Amino acid sequence: MEIILALAAALLFALGTVLQQKAGLDEPEAAAGSSGGLLLRMARRPVWLIGIAADALGFVAQAIALTIGRLAVVQPLLVFSVVFALPLGAKLTGQRVRRADIAAAVVVTAALAVFLLVADPSGGRDDAPIGEWLIAGAIMGGVSAVLVLVARRLHPAGKAATLGIATGILFGLSAALTKAVGDQFEEGVFTIFTDWHLYALIVVGYASMTLSQLSLQTGVLAPAIATSMAFDPIASVVLGTTLLQESLHTSTLGAIAAVAALLAALGGLAVLARTQEGGAVARPAAGTHVTGAAEAAAPVQPAG
């Protein structure tokens, strides 16, 4: 069931992004002007609002999938959002799909199927002691902070990629916290408001959305999208196998094969992320949904 929900979330995220892009393409004057009022201007566009609604439904499906499933399974499957965005983009915004894009989509699909088959995730726990959470948060937060400082001295492409890595790391942490918050519902709806996981999720989610916005605002969107979507599942698998004690495979050979399959999927993802040079074809797979304001502000042009 978690696989179906994760794929549904990926489809909804892809639909949300394409609709938000369509709103920017159809009404470019709405994206013009200061960034401060961007969301208010775009909110006047019904297509953009439908895209936001699709994003919200995608986040709900993702949260449920994380609650009933394993982090190391759900997050890698959200990479399918970039695959689903290809036909949706071609249909709704007139984007051209190249043969290389189709081949990359096939690689991503096949590699993720192999990953799930070989990895055979099992075991795990719903939560971890707060001390372990603090260690994991400190490590991921510290690495992300260092990347942000490094990004300040880089050229636009390097800055976009570096900020994208930091974004992906925090997306993975957000996904782990989302799973923990979802598990609190079993003890009652109001329980989540008395538990620290929700407030940690809000803080990490806000930070990840801010970094995502900064990476997209560099104007060099391909590396920003590719790195954030790549490091999200990587961070999620690391957290799943360490913090939540999920097991990927009992044999060394099987574990190597699972990692190789995931790397192949991420390689195909990098190709797809560059489908629209200078624009985003899909939103980052995330533990918390990202507003389409950046995509709407920089509409995608059909590939040549």
Image (cartoon, rainbow, N blue to C red):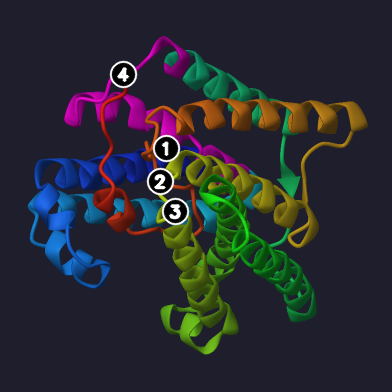
Residue 272 visible in the current orientation: yes
Q: CA distance from mark 4 to mark 2?
A: 21 Å
Q: CA distance from mark 3 to mark 1?
A: 23 Å
Residue 74 visible in the current orientation: no
Q: Which residues are magenta?
A: 73-101
Which quadrant of the structure image shows residue 38?
A: bottom left
Q: Does residue 176 appear left or right of residue 238 in this picture?
A: left
Give the position of the C terminus as an image quadrant.
top left
The residue indicated by pointer 2 is 283
The residue sitting at 51% across, 38% down in the picture is: 79
Contact between marks 2 and 1 (CB within 8 A): the answer is: yes
Residue 81 is marked as 1
The residue indicated by pointer 4 is 304
Query: Residue flagged by tag 4: what amino acid is it?
Result: Gly
Q: Position of residue 233 (x, y in %)?
A: 62, 46
Between disc 3 and disc 4, whose residue precedes? 3
Q: Pointer 4: residues within 10 angstroms few (<14), some, or many (20+)?
A: few
Q: Please state which of residues 159 and 240 is positioned toward the viewer in this rendering.
A: 159
